[in-house]
Structure formats: structure tokens, C-alpha cells
Amino acid sequence: MHRDIKPANLAVKQFDPPSAFIIDLGCATRELASTENVGTIPYLAPEVRAGSRHDRSIDLWSYGVVALELFLLRQPVNAGVPRLDADSASRFHDRLILKSRDESSVEQLLIQLLSWDAKDRPSAAEALGHPSMVRPDPEEMVPSDLDLPVPRKRFESSSSGTG
């Protein structure tokens, strides 16, 4: 368990295709479960804040909060509210549910990641395999009925080698 997933602990490797990795392993543990309350308050899963026994699903909650920030382009809670509590999470769930009922949508992934009950959260593999996380094939992004020019290579080599 990393136990402190937050924007400051994510480093971007490249933008296209997107790739990032987790840094700062100061709170990490190899234990499969813990009752220790460590991490950054706005990103703490409910079970961590409650001092309950928790497992690696807490990292999925934190990832969900970070993803929600990216989705909203702002922090999901007011500066004066140091955590996403049950009422706030419920309101966000309601908004996301109203926005999209498509199981492959990013809103549905956020609903799963921010499930108040840890056993309802997806595993890391399930979250990464969610349809909203799969990068589409660029060929499929342009409708085939559009008459678009085919880009030529910028530097074409001469086959004869002469000018």
C-alpha cells in the first residue's frame, strides 16, 4: 500500500501517450492490511479516517479523489473542508450518476473508485482496464466518411539519391 496517493506524489513521465508513476514511498508499507492512520487528509479513504482496518483499496479511493480533481479541474471540496466526507461523496455520486449512466464512462469509474464501502471499489487492474481508461485507436476517432487529406511524411527520402 502506498497510503499517500495525491497529486504531489505523482510524476508525469510523458504526455503522449500519458504515462506517470508514483513517488514518495515514505508512507508505503508491504503489509496487506493496517489500522495506521497515515496519509494526506483530503485524500484519505473513509476507513483510514475512522481508524478501521484497511487494505490496498485505500489507494484506489485516493486515486479516485485525484481523478475527480482532474475531471472537475478543481479540488472537489472547499478549502475549509479538509476531507471528502460521506455527505460530500454522496452528493458527488448523485451528480455523476445523473451525468452518465453509461458503464464505460469516466463518471462510472469515479463512482466505483469513490465507493464509501471499500469492498465496492475496483482493484487497480480493474480500474486501469476500465473502458474509460483505454486509449482509443486514432483511426477510430475520425469518422470514415470524412474526406480528410492523408498527411505525407515531412522528410521524404529520394530513392535515386540525386537531386
Image (cartoon, rainbow, N blue to C red):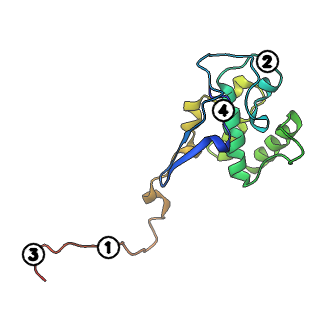
Element on which disc 1 rests: loop
Q: Can residue 101 be seen? A: no
Q: Residue at x 45, y 58 (%)?
A: 138
Q: Can residue 96 be seen? A: yes
Q: Is residue 125 above or below residue 105?
A: above
- Along the viewing direction, whichever of 124 and 40 lies nearer the viewer: 40
- Mark 2 belongs to which amino acid? Ser
Quarter of image, res 54: top right
Q: Which residue is mark 3?
A: 160
Q: Which residue is mark 2?
A: 52
Q: Which residue is mark 4?
A: 60
* Label 4, label 2: how far apart the Cα atoms are: 16 Å
Asked if marks 1 and 3 touch (Cβ < 8 Å), the reply is: no
Element on which disc 3 rests: loop
Q: Callout 3: 10 Å neighbours few (<14), some, many (20+)? A: few
Q: Residue at x 77, y 23 (%)?
A: 37
* Label 1, label 4: how far apart the Cα atoms are: 43 Å
Locate the C terminus and report the quarter of the image it occupies: bottom left
Q: Which residue is mark 1?
A: 154
Where does the image place residue 51, in percent across and percent down from the top left? 81, 20
Asked if marks 3 and 4 touch (Cβ < 8 Å), the reply is: no
Asked if marks 1 and 4 touch (Cβ < 8 Å), the reply is: no
- Mark 3 belongs to which amino acid? Ser
Q: Residue at x 42, y 74 (%)?
A: 148
Give the tally of numbered discs: 4
Q: Is residue 104 above or below residue 127?
A: below
Q: Residue at x 69, y 28 (%)?
A: 58
- Mark 4 belongs to which amino acid? Leu
- Mark 1 belongs to which amino acid? Arg
Locate the N terminus and report the quarter of the image it occupies: top right
Element on which disc 2 rests: loop
